[in-house]
Image: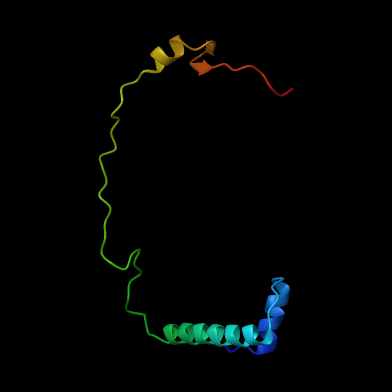
Amino acid sequence: MSLTTDDVKRIARLARIETSDAEAQATQTQLNSIFDLIATMQAVDTSGVSPMAHAQEVYQRLRPDVATETDRRAAFQAIAPAVENGLYLVPKVID
């Protein structure tokens, strides 16, 4: 895919970006080089390559999924202003 200067100016106008002719020409060159790189990358045969989550074989060490804190719910609810059926009661603020 190759962009023309008119394409760059139209895209800039749609994005509400004011560009001069020199800026449009420079942007056209940069965008076309990016499109050429994308085309080169898409031409590579990757049928035998399995998808990876990371470029390196990095694994995150996981800790065991166990509770480390003691249950202090009763202690916290004992000092709460209003509790009912294990739930904190708050004043109604919206009618």
Residue 30 higher or lower than 52, as above or below: below
Between 14 and 42, the one nearer to me in the picture? 14
Position in image of residue 37 (x %, y %) = 46, 84
Quarter-wise, where is residue 24 in the image?
bottom right
Between 70 and 15, the one nearer to me in the picture? 15
Q: How are the residues colored?
A: rainbow
Q: Would you say 65 lies left or right of 84 here?
A: left
Residue 34 higher or lower than 76, as above or below: below
Quarter-wise, where is residue 44 in the image?
bottom left
Where does the C terminus fall, quadrant-wise? top right
Q: Would you say 42 lies left or right of 7 here?
A: left
Instruction: Identify the residue at horizontal 27%, vertical 66% (top origin).
Output: 56
Position in image of residue 90 (x %, y %) = 59, 17
Instruction: Identify the residue at horizontal 33%, vertical 72% (top origin).
Output: 50
Where does the N terminus fall, quadrant-wise? bottom right
Position in image of residue 28 (x %, y %) = 59, 86
